[in-house]
Amino acid sequence: MEKKYIETAHEVLSTYGSGQGVDLQHLLAVLIGPKATPELCGRLCAKGLQDLADLTEHELHEEGLTLTQAQRVMAGFQVGRKWSFISAAEQRFPVRSPEDAYSYLRAKIAYEKQEVFYMLYLNTKNQVIYERAVFKGSLNASLVHPRET
């Protein structure tokens, strides 16, 4: 009997673990589940990581995923986004310039589809202790009044 693609993907993940040896195609197969095929995973992988992360549930469905599979893939990207932001936030990041503020928020704002105005709350050592999205604007502008903060 021929081995299913998902079994191969599981073996690759077990062999290489969290190291760099697991390619995106096998990770997608594990997320998609038992119905994953090399063709489907290869087609999704060919879109590139950033474009794949930006696909909606409907667009993933159009690529051949069921709605449940699309939600699994989207959830995988959301976990990655949350992890990258939380790991940066846990380090008591110092902000001494606009560039520092960008470095702190980069993982969060990279996936925003419209302008978002964030407030960073700092302690006496200029380290971020809390952040909050104050206003979500249009595609390319955010109008914020001091009374709204």
Image: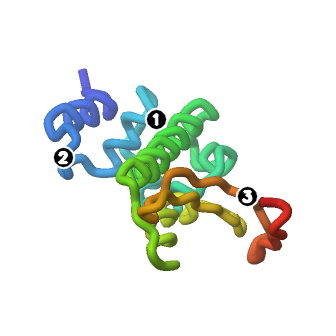
Q: Secondary structure at mark 2?
A: loop
Q: CA distance from mark 2 to mark 1?
A: 20 Å
The amino acid type found where label 2 is placed reads Gly
Q: Earlier in the sequence, mark 2 or mark 1?
A: 2
Q: Camera-side residue: 82 or 32?
A: 82
Q: Earlier in the sequence, mark 2 or mark 3?
A: 2
On screen, residue 58 versus residue 44, left or right, reads: right
Figure quadrant of residue 67: top right
The amino acid type found where label 1 is placed reads Ile
Figure quadrant of residue 35: top left
Residue that mark 3 sits on: 134
Q: Secondary structure at mark 3?
A: strand
Residue that mark 2 sits on: 19
Q: Earlier in the sequence, mark 3 or mark 1?
A: 1
Residue at 32 percent across and 34 percent down: it is 5
- Asked if labels 3 and 2 touch by Cβ distance under 8 angstroms, the answer is no
Residue that mark 1 sits on: 32
Relative to residue 56, is residue 75 depicted above or below?
Answer: above
Is residue 48 visible in this depiction of the protein? no
Q: Name the mark on residue 147.
A: none
The amino acid type found where label 3 is placed reads Val
Is residue 87 visible in this depiction of the protein? yes
Residue at 45 percent across and 75 percent down: it is 96
Residue at 40 percent across and 39 percent down: it is 37
Q: CA distance from mark 2 to mark 3?
A: 38 Å
Q: Secondary structure at mark 1?
A: helix
- The percent position of residue 89, horizontal first and vertical second, equals 43, 52
What sort of colour scheme is used for the picture? rainbow
Residue at 41 percent across and 65 percent down: it is 94
On screen, residue 131 versus residue 145, left or right, reads: left
Relative to residue 53, is residue 37 depicted above or below?
Answer: above
> In this rendering, which labeled residue sits more in front, label 3 or label 1?
3
